[in-house]
Amino acid sequence: MDGYENSHGRAGNYPDSSSYQEAQLPADPAIDPRLFDSSYLTLEHGSEDAVFGDLGQYGPLDTASMSIGQRRLLQEQFDLSGSNDESDDVDDYDDDDERLWNEGKEAYDDYSAIRADPEDPDSQASTEAESEEDDGYDANDASPRPRKRRRRGHGPFSGRYGARGGKGIKRGPRRPLEPSPEFKMLHSQATEAFIDGDYDRAIELVQQAILVNPEMFAAHSLLSEIFLARGEKDKAVTALFSGAHTRPRDPTVWYKVARLIQDRAGENRQKTLNDMIYCYSRIIEIDGKSYNARFQRAAAYRELGYNGRAAGEYERILKELPHNIRALRHLAETYIDMQDVHKALEYYLAGIEYYMSLDNDENMEFSWSDVNICAELYAYVGDPRKGLQLLSSVARWLLGRKDDTIWDDYIDDDREWDAADSPRRIKTDGFIPGSFPIDSYGLGLPMELRIKLGTFRLKLGDRYVEEALAHFEWLSPEDDSENSTVFDYADLYREAADALKDAGLFKEALRFYRPLQLTEDYADVSFFLAMGECAFACSDLSLAESCYLTVAENDSANLQSRVNLAKLYETMGERDQALYYVNQAVLLGREARGRSRRRRKDRRIAQLAKEFQGDTHISTRIVPRHLANEVARREALQDTDANRPQQVKYLYSKMNDLRPNMRAGDSDATEDWLDIADALLHDFRTNRVFYPLQKNRIFLGYSREEQKGGKKKGTVMDEVQEVADRLQEWIGQYNTEATSTSIPNDYYGISFDEWFEIFLEYAFVVSGQGDKDEAYDVLAAATDASVWYHYKDKVRQIHICWFTCALRACDEETLVSEARWFTKEYQFVTDTYRLFSILSRLCGDPSRSLFHASPSMKFMLRQVKAMDSTLPKDHYLMKVSTSKPVVIRQATAKATRGPKNPPKHVSLTTRHDNGELIPAEDMDVALLVLYGHILYSGNSFYPALNYYYRAYALDPENPGILLPIALCYIHHSLKRQADNRHYLILQGLSFMSLYRKVRCEKKIVHEVNKDANEKIQTDVTLLSERQEVEYNYGRVYHSLGLLHQAIPCYERVLELGNQIQSPHKDSSVGGEDKGKAVDHGEKKDEKPEDMLVEDFSPEAAVALQNIYALNGNLAGAREVTEKYLII
């Protein structure tokens, strides 16, 4: 359908489609984007909305069975005369709008008459004549037409009441536009098709009508009814939801949509509540004083668990309607859920103070229920004294004795609430009998508040027990007739009995528990357990046994009843029965622990077990004969997750069988091993017990009490342990496995150490397959697991595996990150600095290496500063530092910079086991050299010299320090900023000479007595050091352009290389020709003494080749290449 004229007079091109979504308007940012989603809402039937009257239930219509009169009534429901979507749901809003609209209707009609059709010549001529007559302008005059002045107070609205935006009327929605004739025709045909039961045709017609006039709410409402009649609730709600945006400023429509969403809700209750919240939010945007909408939105927030938002809504209502009792009640419930009872009590006390300041005729909203709520708040707070005083004063006010304050002085008893004046009330000073009606005293106090007085008295201490029992006696617990109060006040009986039991008055508590057996609502599991506890304490063992057996027979998973029965039979001397129930309690405890570990069902373990296992049956545990029926019944009721422990154990054994072939490189075994490991690790990682929100929480067990810092005193399993210990002493055996409640060290029978190996090996294998992200993810999960998070050796092994995986993946960034982790965790340890330098240079482009990047430079500088700050002050004094030996300086460091007084602003990161920071005891040469290398590799030669010289002062005969100092001078001399180039070169050569002297003349202490191979290794080491010196000299001369000095050095390197390789070749290849390469494919058994030999011959050969080639000696370059560079 192309070119339909809509109600605005503009033609629109709409796509030809029968789907409802395509017939919608383009998405507007102000409209909920969910309306144009391809999926429809799924909602669920909810509670009734208080703001609506009897709107009826919007269920599917059976139009086929309707009579003619009923069809006419249904068609009238969709009649388009009038606005079509007015409703009487919200009378206050619509009555006000109708009144204001009628007052301004005359002005609107006059203005509509002025807007004549421009195509009507008569209308146009009359308009022109009127305008000429008004301004006195002659149309035949050739002079320019004078410009009409527009002044305030003139024009078609001058002096008129009700003009839009003018005086006397608030700005509101425009009058609804009339639907086009084509829309009326299509809508009427769609309604007839709907009545006839032709739903497909009705949907097609109403969608065409929506294309013509999409702003008409009636069409969307009809489409919603059609979808509902077809049983498509989701689409029905979406259609109505979409139509509501055609009347965005009409709260009646949004109330209707919210009601229908609630009535037509599907299974997704959360989505229903969110959509209702959206509707109520639109109503509140239209009218901020719509308090019913705020109440409904707050109720939806509470049901969703957003108690903070709900409390904010109620507080907003109380801000605009101070002391609204409905808001106070809901706010109190919300704050109780939020465990912020003090705030709720503050609001309630302010409300009580306000209502008590009014006359009795004005405070009808405040009732006895509110007194009870306030008393409950004091019970939650744990302040029975103030609760008692408030209850008495407010009850006195509600009974008409507000000024009767003499009772405030009598806080040790409740004589004010006695039934009669005598014997106690008559003796009170200031009491005048007959001043107030007798019903305004004890007889007028509701029973709920009287029981509350009794519970408060019990909580005040033993001296008020008699007063509490006097209140409880009003229930007449011995009355077992048909008119007994237990049928009206069963909840009060339970409250009184529980209060007496908690106070240790078990005999009195039984008096109130026994009548509850006549009722059904309160005779539950907790009731029988409580009554059994009281009977056991009163030595009524038969009653206790009956109560406990009732629970055990009707609740097969109740653990407490089994424990109590075990204790009861132990007391009665029936130890066999006691042992039977102890075993049942142990089994139930294990099952409860297993249930606490359950998470979302993951079928991969079951599928893999079935795949590898085939038809082999996994054997279950062996149980005692007298427990066989119980266990069999439980296993029959359990789902497939019941066999998960056996499946996990089977898969673990299968994985162990596959491990040798996997490590040998078998691809099929590797894939199977990875599948099993992935499923097991997923099960481990989805157990929230191992990943608490607070990482500092140590793993103490699987139950919630154990996770919160150890098992609580007097837990059920503690009782089981005690009873079992006594019974086992009696039978002369002790089975620690059956009743052990210590911290578990396994999961599904697999120890945590074995799980740890699975984590590391899985990461190592997948990294070898190129999936480094999966390896890192698994290692991160292992690091965060509470079973290993607090153990340094485990965490260290994880990070060692981490950088090993990064090495396999050539991931320079991860390597640097891991190097920094080791440096921080093991601060001031020389090996960590060496590890940092190694890991930072193994991967990546040397010219763009992260080794000399800014983050690494700053990190190492912080380490140097931390070391400097923890050293003693006299360490920096030249005289003292050179005169004191190292041992004295270390002692001074310990005395001045101990762990209890670390220097300020120092980034110390390593701690002792007791938590104390570990300061540096002496300057670390490796750290200074490492930071110098970082600066050197970044071409900062002069700054690097500062740290090299500090290291040189501590270790003057270290060739690893002398060489970089020499190179710093040499390289800096070649820079443009060099002040004295020759001086720098001479300085560098002088340090090179020191480097030669130290490196070549250094004696290696090595005993060579028996093993000849050890002597060969010593000689090769000396030759390698000499070769290294010659090569470095050659490089220095080569960089300075002194080729005549560099060539002899390189030639000596090649000669020394031949000497180094000759003993190695003789021992490795025996009688083979010297020109042949070593066969590295030989078995290790044939070369047990093979060793790595450092040889600079290839590097020297390349340098010589370049020198010869660049200077025209191609023959010499070819000779060097063929002799040293061809493999």
Image (cartoon, rainbow, N blue to C red):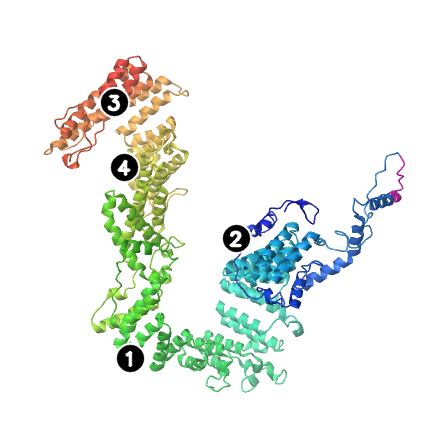
From the viewer's side, name the closer residue of 425 and 971: 971
Residue 626 percent location from the top left of the image: 26, 73
Q: Name the residue under label 4.
A: 886
| N-term-proximal mark, 2 vs 1 | 2
What residue type is disc 3 on? Leu
Quadrant of residue 955 within the rendered picture: top left
Residue 827 percent location from the top left of the image: 33, 42
Which residue is at 46% across, 83% downward?
Answer: 477
Quadrant of residue 410 within the rendered picture: bottom right
Name the front one of labels 2 and 1. 2
Which type of secondary structure does the marked residue at label 3 adopt?
Answer: helix
Name the front one of labels 4 and 1. 1
From the viewer's side, name the closer residue of 723 and 3: 3
What residue type is disc 4 on? Val
The quarter of the rendered structure image containing the C terminus is: top left
For the residues marked 2 and 1, what is the alpha-carbon distance in whole angstroms? 66 Å
Q: Name the residue under label 2.
A: 39
Q: Name the residue under label 1.
A: 572
Q: In this view, does 821 lie above or below 1071?
A: below
What residue type is disc 1 on? Met
Magenta segment, which residues? 132-141
Which type of secondary structure does the marked residue at label 4 adopt?
Answer: helix
Labels 3 & 1 near each other (Cβ < 8 A) = no
| N-term-proximal mark, 4 vs 3 | 4
Name the front one of labels 4 and 2. 2
Q: In this view, does 1063 lie to the left or right of 998?
A: left
For the residues marked 4 and 1, what is the alpha-carbon distance in whole angstroms? 77 Å
